[in-house]
Image: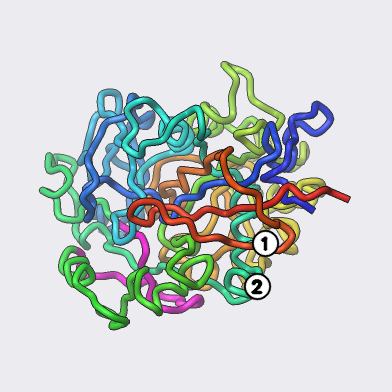
């Protein structure tokens, strides 16, 4: 059996239903770390893409917003790199994929989808070529392929992956909307997760709020396997428990860090589909109701998940469970095969189960720094698609690359072998599979 992510599902009778491709694939490239900000504790050049941000107001964490009641809220668009900005004129910058880097947050589903495809544009900073790569936002099927390989005997062999539960919490300070500081001028304002970190456990129920730049500076100097304030780096022995292989060659930030947006949704006509994800959920003014090579569409129950139903937790959970029960034909995405319900913590390793539905039609995976034991490889959840940071449906940067690569030697997929193929500074992990015959 070949995982759906690597199979040709372009036939009109299949229509990419399981998250397949338009040809048989020998393998995919997956970013080694969550997307991070160029110059965010790294030496990557800051280069503008041709894209601008599509959202003027974003969800902001209580500390950064400075609310008296300690509740999250909304405010002007912002991030660490660009400061508080005008979304109509501010260009999105190319992300970098390195360890100990400020994770790229405050980006919605629409912009994540477009940015992922931008990674092979003519001025990209990675040396990628659109003739040999097809960069796109990771689909649930591709997340599932990584999750299964990670749990195989060639990965963690059934062990739960360590969580990245460290946060800088925007420097533990309020950020005024009149703040004009950008990037390194602002300390760690608007920064929450940092790539490639862990406290060395899978079930750490408490997030670790650090002292910001002071902690990062100490982590930069860490040696051997000695933790800094209880934190391990990705290249330390204990820190490697947070990789998909349990070694330095694996994929990190699959549990915790930031929620990872995937190119998957339910076409229930919720307004958020167009507002926060038009690029992936719409063709012009018509909603896409079938999966494509770049997107996955889940079924929805027409009685419990339709416009006009009041938006509250009870109705959301009812719609999610109904949609989950309808989802009987899509496999390989590490959802139905590894969970028992559309709500709660029914996934493998007690990870979160939150199926798409109602006013949360988009999928995201892995959990964030504060989700504790609920985060993990088999964590799936729902969101409205909007740009956010630490509120009810906390957003994050997505695993922005899942690249088609056509010049790889074939290996045996049935053995689920993970091969190390570090490029340059070790930014990518390649997963090679054979196209074995299906029974």
Q: Is residue 319 left or right of residue 283?
A: right
Expressed as whole percent of the image width and height from the top left, the position of residue 359 reads: 58, 41
Q: Which residue has dot 1 on it? A: 416
Whether residue 129 appears in this view of the structure is yes
Residue 287, placed above or below residue 329:
above
Which stretch appears magenta?
192-212
Expressed as whole percent of the image width and height from the top left, the position of residue 329 reads: 81, 46
**Is there CB contact under 8 Å for labels 2 and 1?**
yes
> Which numbered disc, 2 or 1, marks the residue that appears first in the sequence?
2
Q: What element carries label 1?
A: loop
Whether residue 140 appears in this view of the structure is no
Instruction: Name the residue at 66% across, 41% down.
Output: 25
Looking at the rendering, which quadrant does residue 226 occupy?
bottom left
Magenta stretch encompasses residue 210: yes
Q: Which residue has dot 2 on it? A: 153
Residue 249, placed above or below residue 12:
below
Instruction: Name the residue at 28% across, 61% down.
Output: 169
């Amino acid at each position: 059996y070949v995982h759906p992510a690597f199979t040709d599902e372009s036939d009109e009778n299949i229509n990419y239903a399981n998250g397949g491709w338009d040809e048989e694939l020998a393998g995919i490239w997956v970013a080694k770390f969550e997307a991070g900000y160029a110059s965010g504790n790294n030496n990557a050049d800051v280069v503008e893409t041709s894209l601008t941000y599509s959202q003027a107001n974003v969800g902001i964490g209580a500390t950064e917003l400075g609310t008296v009641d300690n509740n999250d809220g909304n405010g002007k668009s912002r991030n660490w790199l660009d400061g508080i900005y005008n979304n109509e004129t501010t260009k999105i910058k190319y992300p970098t994929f390195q360890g100990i880097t400020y994770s790229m947050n405050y980006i919605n589903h629409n912009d994540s989808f477009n940015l992922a495809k931008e990674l092979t544009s003519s001025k990209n900073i990675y040396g990628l070529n659109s003739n040999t790569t097809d960069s796109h936002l990771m689909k649930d099927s591709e997340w599932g392929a990584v999750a299964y390989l990670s749990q195989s005997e060639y990965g963690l062999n059934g062990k739960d992956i360590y969580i990245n539960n460290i946060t800088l919490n925007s420097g533990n300070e309020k950020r005024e909307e009149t703040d004009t500081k950008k990037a390194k001028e602002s300390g760690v304002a608007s920064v929450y997760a940092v790539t490639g970190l862990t406290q060395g456990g899978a079930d750490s129920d408490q997030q670790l709020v650090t002292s910001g730049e002071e902690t990062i500076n100490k982590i930069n100097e860490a040696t051997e396997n000695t933790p800094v304030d209880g934190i391990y780096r990705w290249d330390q022995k204990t820190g490697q428990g947070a990789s998909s292989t349990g070694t330095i060659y694996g994929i990190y930030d699959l549990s915790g860090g930031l929620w990872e947006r995937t190119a998957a949704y339910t076409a229930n006509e919720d307004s958020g589909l167009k507002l926060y994800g038009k690029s992936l959920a719409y063709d012009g003014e018509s909603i896409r109701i079938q999966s494509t090579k770049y997107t996955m569409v889940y079924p929805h129950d027409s009685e419990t998940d339709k416009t006009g139903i009041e938006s509250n937790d009870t109705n959301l959970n009812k719609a999610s469970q109904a949609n989950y029960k309808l989802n009987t034909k899509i496999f390989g995405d590490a959802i139905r095969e590894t969970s028992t319900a559309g709500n709660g913590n029914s996934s493998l390793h007690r990870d979160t189960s939150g199926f798409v539905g109602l006013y949360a039609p988009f999928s995201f995976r892995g959990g964030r720094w504060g989700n504790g034991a609920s985060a993990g490889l088999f964590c799936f959840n729902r969101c409205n698609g909007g740009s956010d940071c630490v509120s009810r449906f906390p957003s994050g940067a997505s695993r922005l690359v899942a690249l088609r690569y056509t010049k790889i030697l074939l290996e045996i997929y049935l053995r689920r072998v993970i091969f190390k193929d570090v490029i340059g500074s070790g930014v990518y992990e390649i997963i090679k599979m054979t196209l074995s015959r299906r029974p």
